[in-house]
Amino acid sequence: MIASRRSAALDELFALLRLPSVSTLPEHRGDCERAVQLLMAKFTAMGLEHVQRLMVRERGLPLVYADWLHAPGAPTVLFYGHYDVQPPDPLAEWISPPFTPTLRDGNIYARGAADDKGQVFAQIESVQAWMQAEHALPVNVRFLLEGEEEVGGESVEAYIRTHHAELACDCVVVSDTAMYAPGLPSLDVGLRGMVYTEVEVQGAERDLHSGLYGGAAPNPLEALARIITGLKSGEGKILIPGFYDRVAPPAVKEKDAWRRLPFDEEAFRRDEVRSPALTGEAGFSVFERTWARPTLEVHGIPGGFTGAGAKTVIPARAAAKISMRLVPDQDPEEIAAQFTAAVQRLTPAGCTSQVRILSTAPAVLVSPDNRYVGAAVASLRRVFGAEPVFIRSGGSIPVVALCAAELGAPVVMMGFGLPDDGLHSPNEKFALSSFYGGIRALADFMLRLTERA
Ligand SMILES: [Zn+2]
């Protein structure tokens, strides 16, 4: 990349980072709209076509689409990313203001630098590099950028489900993940799925005095505690009948590769988790427990009296937010049904329970043996000068599973972030080496796709 383009690319990224496109806060709708306009202008100036602002649902945030489809016979790559960001608070902890992008020690500091504006811009600049040098691309390209990734991604989901022809492609490239360690290029080949629930337990019709009725009246908070401990053992085993039936263990080759990753369990406990001990299923490594085993976690338990002092109430109602992370080949609908049945069965006499399923997403596992992943490995190796590693992520990116299922195309998760980028935290950063390396790797990736398999 020539020097003048390097600084122009950075200037344009900074302009996008200056826009507080916080999707969860209604007062920032105008900033989201400005981000859309900036991206559309950029696509048009680069020579992309069919540049569109797509409004899928009322009160949603627009998608941005653009394409260049003049490489007959060559594969079509769909680039996905998001222009929305998380709120920047706590503001006082930022060294430089979140929406004033600042260079320090080879890093770009700003909200959205790594998640995901910097990575989206690496995709865009890789295309721009080709357009500038050749006035053409080696492959066909589509861009689909959304503005609701941080708030559930409803618009992009609806659009993908109903626009298969408009999004037809041979592979999807998602740049919204991180490398395992600095200098260690990584391809994420697995994501966990998710079933998020809300359990409500009802006892008596109204709150009761624990002196007058305690001993005879049911207590829904206690019932909830019994239900939760009935769902998962103290050793981390989930006790829902049938829950593990479809769990597919990682391949021996994959587990061997994980053993070779640089990892210090004690440092992980001390510096990342910062708890006195790690928990979880015996006989499984931390990688297995966080990447390849399902979980059940309680996120909150509203109910009863929580103010200062004492109030002797037996509450009428209690609730809990409980989610499960799923792994291949668990079926979210089946797990949701098993969970609901288990909660009903565990509900003690005197109480009734109700389960609401708030969201579901299946796990994703990309076979490392396809030519798109092969091309990505070769490009990452060349640009970063190290052998790429295959990793999984314990998190969930629902759009990845959706693209794989709806578009029938393999998803290549080529992400350039670093583990300490501070996504969703103060002082979020993106390394310049990730930005420029990402641009070069993606530009090289497009060329490799034209090589005969
Ligand atoms: Zn993201």
Image (spheres, helix red, strand yellow):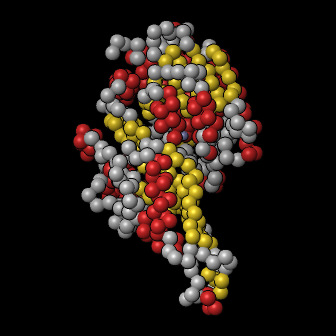
Q: Answer left or right for 183 relative to 105.
A: left
Reply above or below: 323 against 10. below
Does residue 130 appear in this view?
Answer: no
Q: Which residue does the image show at 56% across and 21% down from the upper left?
A: 165
Near-viewer residue (359 or 118): 359
Q: Where is residue 314 in the image (x, y as percent from the top left)?
A: 61, 81
Q: Answer left or right for 106 relative to 52.
A: left
Looking at the rendering, which quadrant does residue 211 occupy?
A: bottom right
Reply above or below: 185 against 286. above
Q: Which residue does the image show at 70% across and 47% down from the upper left?
A: 25
Looking at the rendering, which quadrant does residue 270 occupy?
A: bottom left
Q: Where is residue 120 in the image (x, y as percent from the top left)?
A: 55, 30
Q: Which residue does the image show at 37% across and 13% down from the upper left?
A: 451
Does residue 331 appear in this view?
Answer: yes
Q: Which residue lies furthest to the bottom in this view?
A: 212
Q: In which quarter of the image is the C terminus?
A: top left
Looking at the rendering, which quadrant does residue 350 occupy?
A: bottom right
Indicate which quadrant contains ligand 1: top right
Near-viewer residue (155 or 380): 155
Q: Which residue does the image show at 59% across and 26% down from the upper left?
A: 163
Q: Where is residue 229 in the image (x, y as percent from the top left)?
A: 43, 69
Q: Where is residue 135 in the image (x, y as percent from the top left)?
A: 55, 8
